[in-house]
Amino acid sequence: MTDPPSPSPPIDLLRGHPRTSLLPVSPLLTATTSTLTSPLPTDSYAASRHPLHYGPDLGNWDVRVEIAGWVREMYGLDKAEEIAAERVCLTSGASYALGEVLRQCTSPVTGYTRRAFVVTPTYYLVGRVLEDAGFADKMTAVRSLPGGTIDFGFLEKELERLEKISPEVSLEEGLRPYLRPGVKMDAKRIYRHILYCVPTYSNPTGETFSLATRHRLLSLARKYDILIVSDDVYDFLGNVGDGSAVDGEGRLLPRLVTLDARDCDKTGAGNTVSNCSFSKLLGPGLRCGWIESATGKIARIVGEGGANHSGGAPSHFASTLLLPLLRPSLTPPQTRLITPLIHRFRLAYTSTSHTALRAIRTHLPPSTRISGGKGGFFIWLEFPPEIDARGVVKVAREMENGVIVGSGDMSECMGGDRNWCNWGRSCVRISVAYQDEEGVEEGVRRLGEAVRRWRENPIQGEVETGVVKEE
């Protein structure tokens, strides 16, 4: 008599990072060898320094120059919109960069910075970063809406309300905890509000802000002194052939920082920061990224913050190893090696996205609403009203041959009942980055099986807000 087959481990459709087989180990080994065996700078105060010296505060100049040129090419910007390297500051990834921008450009404890607006559903770990920066009781959720937009009516009313009820805190008072006596106030730039968003292939919905939404958001930012911090980490990861995040000429939609840079006061700081990371493009262990500001001011302020100034650019070593991938080849068509590497990821995610969408339409209730699946890492599902998504998530995780998906509760903006949108009642998030086609197909099939079992025996799931970090 043979034993029954052992249950297979749960399939993980939660993790928001590339599967191990996609990580570009060989190209990074070649780039590392090239960097460390080439003639290296010896002057530890040079603009571009030895990988094992302290880095310049904003990062090696040659790396910043190549990032600026590469980004301009990727967005199809013409020469008139060339990105100055002064606008680029290297970071140790998007999470660190957000925390540092908040530290350098806000003053919530004094009351000068009144509110952090968070477009919801949102990246599920951003709330902790905002809490650490002093916004635990100052977060306000702004709903994303169909059609690539957000609830502007609510946002504008809330901004007007805060203008009327907030105590007037002067710039001098707002800066007092951050500037020692004798330092000029223009050494810093702090804002009245912060707004956090993921405009392109959003985490978790996979949707993209329209160009009209970007223009309107920037207009509000200028009117109410908002600093928009946009996670632009998925822009280069559109599915091959997708047209939802490009303009009429086939170019990637301009970022908020690009729109801001076109006509902002060049002597000021602008109202936008583009937050980018090689973690999403090559591998999260690199802990290397960059911010771009509309002028050079915010990049400089972040780069010259106390911790950066003490230790130098936090990703100095990693960034120097990436330089060979960022430089154009010496032979026509002078392709940068990083571009085909990213295209390889795009091909993989395009395939898993298409597989997931087919499986969703096959195995899940026909009235399930699907968002995303056009680029980036995620697809957002909204079950019909008779299905309790929390219960399905629980059944899926606990059944033999189960599947792990992200409850919609994870994507709530922190801040209690006033920000609660009850996403977990109907919604789940699945990732197309970590599993291959077979894993995605089987994972969605198992999710469909969990829906069937829940219908046979409805159970109440638990609200999930403190989920273990997976990305």
Image: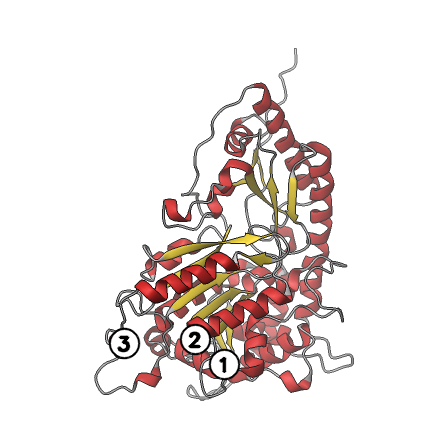
Task: Say which of marks 3 and 1 sits in front.
Answer: 3
Instruction: Give the amino acid type for the residue marked by disc 1 in the picture.
Output: Asn
**How far is disc 3 from disc 1 in space, using C-alphas?**
36 Å
Which residue is found at the position 44% from the left and 32% from the top?
462
Vertical placement of 389 versus 469: above or below? above
Vertical placement of 328 versus 369: above or below? below
Residue 106 in picture, x, y percent from top left = 35, 70
Vertical placement of 153 versus 368: above or below? below
Say whether marks 2 and 1 touch (CB < 8 Å): yes
Q: Earlier in the sequence, mark 3 or mark 2?
A: 3
**Nearer the observer, 292 or 186:** 186
Q: Earlier in the sequence, mark 2 or mark 1?
A: 1
Which residue is found at the position 68% from the left and 62% from the top?
245
Q: In terms of image quadrants, where is residue 97? A: bottom left
Q: Earlier in the sequence, mark 3 or mark 1?
A: 1
Instruction: Give the amino acid type for the residue marked by disc 3 in the picture.
Output: Ser
Q: Does residue 40 show up?
A: no
Which residue is found at the position 51% from the left and 28% from the top?
398
Q: For the residue carrying disc 2, how many other residues have a C-alpha within 10 Å: few (<14), some (14-19), or many (20+)?
A: many
Label disc, if present, on residue 313 of the rendered structure: 2
Q: In terms of image quadrants, where is residue 376? A: bottom right
**How far is disc 2 from disc 1 in space, using C-alphas?**
8 Å
Write down the residue under mark 1.
60
Instruction: Give the amino acid type for the residue marked by disc 2 in the picture.
Output: Ala
Write down the residue under mark 3.
170
Residue 131 in picture, x, y percent from top left = 34, 56
